Image (tube, grey):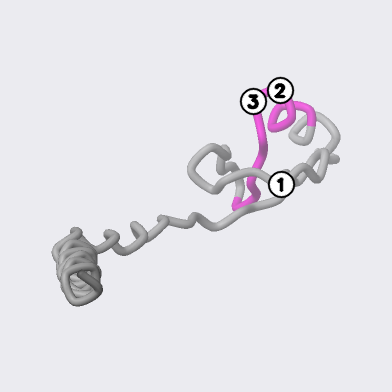
Amino acid sequence: MSRLVFLVAIVALVYLLLKSYRRPSRKPHAVEVTEDMVRCAYCGVNLPKSESLLADGKRYCNEAHRRAQANDLPS
């Protein structure tokens, strides 16, 4: 009787090992795309480069800050 219990335990152990090896492996983490951050020339807030406005070689967070900076410059 003890041989039967031992045999069942071995079979169960082999089954669990095989099942764990057949499990699909975890997918590697997707590569996150990063983007350069820039600072608004008027207020100093940091924002992604793609969301900024470029004017006269400077980056701005919105059109109002671009206009305000342009109005502050001496003629």
Contact between labelled residues 1 and 2, with CB atoms less than 8 Å apart? no
* Mark earlier in primary sequence (3, 1): 1
Task: Give the quadrant of residue 9.
Answer: bottom left
Task: Give the quadrant of residue 24.
Answer: bottom left
Contact between labelled residues 1 and 3, with CB atoms less than 8 Å apart? no
Nearest to the observer: residue 46 or residue 34: 34
Dot 1 alpha-carbon crowd within 10 angstroms: few under 14, some 14 to 19, many 20 or more: some
Q: Quadrant of the C terminus?
A: top right
Question: From which residue to which does the magenta span run?
Answer: 57-68
Looking at the picture, which amino acid does disc 3 mark?
Answer: Glu
Q: Which residue is mark 1?
A: 46
Residue 14 versus residue 73 in the image, above or below: below
Q: Secondary structure at mark 3?
A: helix
From the viewer's perspective, is 2 left or right of 52? left
Looking at the picture, which amino acid does disc 1 mark?
Answer: Asn
Dot 3 alpha-carbon crowd within 10 angstroms: few under 14, some 14 to 19, many 20 or more: few
Q: CA distance from mark 2 to mark 1?
A: 16 Å
Circle number at residue 64: 2
Looking at the picture, which amino acid does disc 2 mark?
Answer: Ala
Residue at image location 57% in from the left, 46% down from the top: 48
From the viewer's perspective, is 66 left or right of 6? right
Residue 62 versus residue 6 in the image, above or below: above
Circle number at residue 63: 3
Look at discs 3 and 1 and give the one toward the viewer: 1
Q: Secondary structure at mark 1?
A: strand
Q: Position of residue 63 (x, y in %)?
A: 64, 25
Instruction: Give the farthest residue toward the top.
Output: 64
Dot 2 alpha-carbon crowd within 10 angstroms: few under 14, some 14 to 19, many 20 or more: few
